[in-house]
Image (cartoon, rainbow, N blue to C red):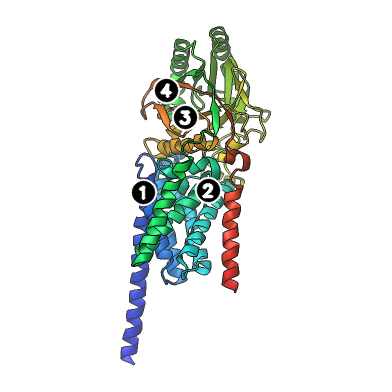
Amino acid sequence: MKSLTNAGHYLRQTSIYALQNSSCKLFLAGLLFPLGYSPFNYPGLTLLSLAFFYAYLVQETSFKQTVLASLSYGIGLFGLGVSWVIISVHDYGHLNYILSGCVTFIFILYLSCYVAFTGSVFYFIGNKKNPLISGLIFSALWCISEFSRATLFTGFPWLLAGTSQIDVPLKFLAPVIGSYGLSFITCFSASLLANSMRKNGVKRYIYLAVFVALLIFPLLLKSIQWTRLAEQPLTTAIIQANLSMRDKWDESLFWQILNHYQEKTEKYLGKDLIVMPESAIPLPGSYVEDFLQSIDKKAKTAKTAVVLGILQSTEEEMAYSNSIITLGKASGEYSKRHLVPFGEYIPALFRSVNKLLMLPEPGLIPGPFKQPSIRIKHMPVASLICYEIAYPSLLRQQMPEARWIISVSDNGWFGHSLASYQQIQMARVLSLQTGRFQVIANNDGLSSIINEKGTVIDSLPPFSSGVLQSAIYSATGTTPWIIWGDKPAIIFCFLILIFSLLLKIK
């Protein structure tokens, strides 16, 4: 009897150890995932990270182990990947480091639940006896979890797996299958790599051969020019002020900031386009009408289009829109449609908590869903403001009429962190998906020009002040992704899951 008791105790201890050990390993594997993104730029590590995760899921483990290990993987992934959230919460949410850490961890835990969803559903429907089918199921689940994360509760489509592959041949699939399609192919490639390591003999080399072929075959699309570029370039100047958030909203520095933008704008009049970042002028437009009229008049004389970010008054009292306005040889206005939760507005569910903690409440409201395009030199242009760069669907709505893309941002909210680098990487995917040049004006650095192939051709250093002079080309035409969007990729993933469920039932 004593021996049975000892045996039971031993089994409990070893199972606890196995649970802790697997969770620790998966946490470390999750840390590898964000290293495929800027500024690290090791896309192979994202593949390797997913391969580790898949290899764990196809093992014979308990449901509890699978869920906790998957959650640990997600905590590692998002704990490093979106660590910059704590800067905004602490510095501008007016919470101490302990509370900021708690809020950030809750957010990371929430994001990790989507990874746990992938692991837990795979536990029930994954076909572990057939490596090919199990790889397809894993890829479909991951893709659907990313889509859900981008959609539910206003969404957070950050660190999509496909985005990490912008510098390898897989990127040439982006104009055809979009970001989620890229994520699917990335995950399936990772499953092939994992299966090759788990097999012996001829099967190992077969999986490796298919893995290599899948990574290389997109090169066949490299020479395709989806859109037609104009022969004549448009000269551009992007003003990057590099103001900290405290300086930007410091009343004593207002005139200094205004003079800085005025001097830089007047210096580069004569260019086809001058762009200033998000909320460049730290007051609503109605407060600086004389300044705007002066710039407008001079820009028209110089035949220059001026685009800048500024707050605009709305019909609601004490409510503003985060907007892009145009001056000189440009027309139209764009108001941000997808606001940042907790940063630009407080979700209704949390307003009572916000009041209880006596935190400041932002007074921004979203712009209308459908807005006419801004026009520069009579050409329609797509517009995105900061966080909207993570939502390809917002850009697709403005295509194929738009000739190029203007994105304005202010990532000063996130300090010296990974946020700006990750945002540029997402912007590169957007240019590639649409076959359009993109002008990015960011207050605190990495203001860039991206060509239609998703390559950064000019850029300013991060956390520095300067003016980026470059040229862009307008484009006409369309890509397959502009025509059908992300629907084919998502539908394909659901079909895989339905098929796998039918196999399970049989």
Q: Confirm or deny contact between disc 1 and disc 4 (CB under 8 A).
A: no
Q: Earlier in the sequence, mark 1 or mark 4?
A: 1
Q: Confirm or deny contact between disc 2 and disc 3 (CB under 8 A).
A: no
- Determine the secondary structure under disc 2: helix
What residue did someone put label 1 on? 44
Find residue 161 and report its horizontal and vertical position in percent. Answer: 46, 49
Q: Nearer the viewer, residue 212 or 165?
A: 212
What residue did someone put label 2 on? 180
Q: Which mark is residue 451?
A: 3
Marks 2 and 4, how far apart at CA? 35 Å
What residue did someone put label 4 on? 241
Q: Amino acid at mark 2?
A: Tyr
The residue depicted at 45 percent of the width and 47 percent of the height is: 217
The residue depicted at 54 percent of the width and 45 percent of the height is: 177
| 108 left or right of 154 in image | left
The residue depicted at 60 percent of the width and 59 percent of the height is: 495
Q: Nearer the viewer, mark 2 or mark 3?
A: 3
Q: Amino acid at mark 3?
A: Asn
Q: Earlier in the sequence, mark 2 or mark 4?
A: 2
| 382 left or right of 65 in image | right
Marks 4 and 3, how far apart at CA? 23 Å
Is residue 171 visible in the rendered structure shown here? no
- Determine the secondary structure under disc 3: loop
Q: Nearer the viewer, mark 1 or mark 4?
A: 1
Q: Confirm or deny contact between disc 4 and disc 3 (CB under 8 A).
A: no
